[in-house]
Image (cartoon, rainbow, N blue to C red):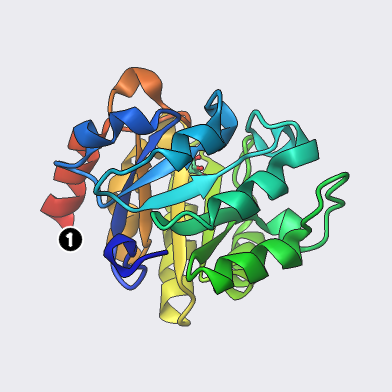
Amino acid sequence: MSDAYAIDLDSFSLCASTADLAAEPAAREHADCVEFRMDLADDPLDALATYDGDLPLLVTNRPRWEGGETAPYDRLDALAAAVEHGAVAAVDVELATLRGRPTGTNEVDAEGLVARAREHDAAVVASVHDFDGTPPAATLDLLLRAAAAAGDVGKLAVTARTKGEALALLSATHRATGRGDRVATMAMGEHGSHTRAVAPVYGSRLGYAPIDAADATAPGQYDLATLRRLVDDLL
Ligand SMILES: O=C1C[C@@](O)(C(=O)O)C[C@@H](O)[C@@H]1O
């Protein structure tokens, strides 16, 4: 990564989530970075090769087993190639991968990917997603602690089936920040939308929003301009 493209993980950064890097100019007004969803793009490495936008990139290549679209066979290799790009400031790696989930035919394993990221000064976002619900408080604490230890920031996206579950995620975020863990949190789904605006108040370092609401990459996301306004009003 070149210094011009750093993402500040010591304060809140808002990522415009997109599968189309050509949309970056439209994100500049409100976003601090772009989450490039490589798994949703047609030729992600080609798109990266020609990227010359202003915003730093966080690259994500989500496998199907964690709610994404990538077939597992080449996804870590593609991420390892991506972190060599000067605009890539961070890479998302699932905690399950970092914990040794088999990586199949990839030449690069999780350790190799992290080493490649380090070589190129790209931060590692260790991520956990629960698309079914929100685990009990003790599990939220364990997951956040483990994710924060495994990456430069530990990200936890759960699904809030009730407002109470959304509140449980906010409380876990508050506890994690209190014990010094660098985390990013959000509750997916209708009951969790407000956590995207409020979690940064409790220390969440990353938020995600589509430039247009129609292109949401997760349930319950606000569009980019709305989340920027809400977060800025609260922080
Ligand atoms: O992991 C995340 C968080 C997210 O799922 C969300 O709920 O905003 C959106 C994804 O694009 C991103 O990779």
> In the image, residue 23 lies at what x, y percent?
30, 29
Looking at this view, is 160 or 147 the one in front?
147
Q: Quadrant of the N terminus?
A: bottom left
Quick check: 135 above or below 148? Answer: above
Residue appearing at x 46%, y 41% in the figure = 49
> In the image, residue 124 lies at what x, y percent?
54, 64
| Three-letter residue code for mark 1 | Leu
Quick check: 5 above or below 51? Answer: below
Looking at this view, is 8 or 182 the one in front?
8
Residue appearing at x 36%, y 65% in the figure = 2
Looking at this view, is 136 or 53 the one in front?
53
Looking at this view, is 219 or 46 the one in front?
46
* 11 displayed left or right of 117: left
* 98 displayed left or right of 179: right
Q: Quadrant of the C terminus?
A: bottom left
Q: Is residue 161 visible?
A: no
Residue lying at the far bottom of the rendered structure: 179
Estimate how packed mark 1 is, as few (under 14), some (14 to 19) or many (20 or more) residues with alpha carbons within 10 Å. few
> In the image, residue 137 lies at what x, y percent?
59, 61
* 150 displayed left or right of 33: right
Q: Which residue is mark 1?
A: 235
> In the image, residue 10 lies at what x, y percent?
33, 73
Mark 1 beta carbon near ligand 1 (under 8 Å): no
Q: Quadrant of residue 99?
A: bottom right
SS at mark 1 in the image: loop
